[in-house]
Amino acid sequence: MELRVNIKDHAYDIILMRGALDEVGKYLDLNRKVLIVTDAGVPEEYAKKVLSQAKDGFVVTVNQGEESKSLDTYKKILEYMVEKSFTRSDCVVAVGGGVCGDLAGFVASGYMRGIDFYNIPTTLLSQLDSSIGGKVAVNLGGVKNIVGAFYQPKRVIIDPNTLKTLDKRQTMAGLCEGIKMAATMNKELFELIEDSKDLEKDLDTIILESLKLKKAVVEEDPTEKGIRKVLNFGHTIGHAIESHESLGGLLHGECVGLGMLPLASSNACKRIKAVLEKYSLPTKIDVKASDLIDYIRRDKKAKGDTVTLVYVNALGTYEFINKDISEIEKIISEGIL
């Protein structure tokens, strides 16, 4: 399956096919110097498959986790590229989850003012969401993705076979991005996830339908000036949860799932909560709402003391609402504490 993301001056293809990683050289221009960015949690064989098909390849392996999305790691990779004499005609390939994609994409955007970037997401979360759309970034001062750019990949390779090595918790957390898009834009997809009796069998369909939704949104609003903000459903509160030190054991997708619940009507919330529970995802946290507010105040969507939030009244629909900080604190208290 091939999907074309039609963004003016930056159109690119998404290749969705089992086994694509085994013949990645057919789909990517690797006949040059290639920097492969992966992390310690990704099976080595995935980066090696890309390396074996590159003319002149180098692998940089960063530590697993959000700590690697830092200006320090960004600087070290750029220094390595200078040391290895990378030029504007060379490329960067991300092999891994969202951390690898965000970091490698930001490196590609900055090196010599921008070189080719390919993304090979190997987690369900990154395949459903962060692999496309061109958001690349690192964290700073405890705030997620606060330093970054919009930088579109040249091509995205999605091989669902890579999910076979993903542990169950990571898979379920990744599913939250599909639940997010379904809850806001596709009731039928939500019902597929809700009613699925064999998630592994349904994954290819869930990935494809989620990509179609994100593709349509990104094409209409590539730099998040309007409708693309719908993709932030669950993220404003979710990022605050993720950033809070005492909740450091939660995965990104789990935080997004929690962040959806306070921003849905009673009926929609009940069904989203039931789906999260079906897939062993958390629906409550033990923290004070006031402890999350400082993170929300620093959210990129905040304007003064007002934040634009995505609200789901009926599944498959959404609206944007503006709430001040005190109102959000109350919403959190009533929703997930």
Image (spheres, helix red, strand yellow):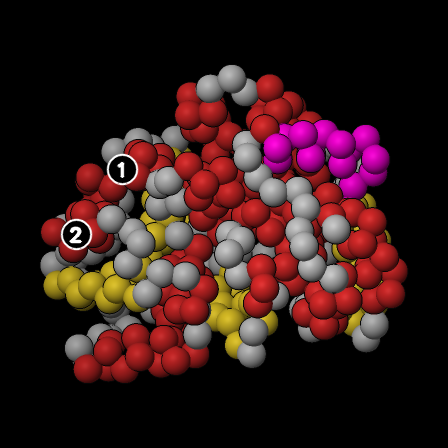
Most prominent secondary structure in the magenta stretch?
Answer: helix
Amino acid at the residue labelled 1: Ala
Q: Which residue is mark 1?
A: 20
Q: Quadrant of residue 266?
A: top right
175 or 223, which lies in front?
Answer: 175
Q: Is residue 137 above or below residue 309?
A: below
* Mark 1 → mark 2, Cα distance in angstroms: 14 Å
Is residue 303 inside the magenta stretch? Answer: no
| Residue 19 on image: x %, y % | 25, 33
Residue at (46, 59) in percent of width and height: 152
Q: Is residue 233 left or right of residue 326?
A: left
Residue drawn at point x = 49 percent, y = 68 percent:
137
Place of residue 155 in the rendered image (x, y in percent of width and height, measured from the top left): 37, 50
Query: Looking at the rendering, in which quadrant would you find the N terminus?
Result: top left
Q: Quadrant of residue 269?
A: top right
Residue assigned mark 2: 48
Residue 267 position in % (x across, y down): 81, 30
Secondary structure beneath dot 2 equals helix
Tag 1 secondary structure: helix
Q: Where, by quadrant of the figure, is residue 68 drawn?
A: bottom left
Q: Are marks 1 and 2 in contact (CB under 8 Å)?
A: no
Which region of the structure is painted magenta? 263-277
Looking at the image, tell me whether mark 1 or mark 2 is earlier in sequence order.
Answer: 1
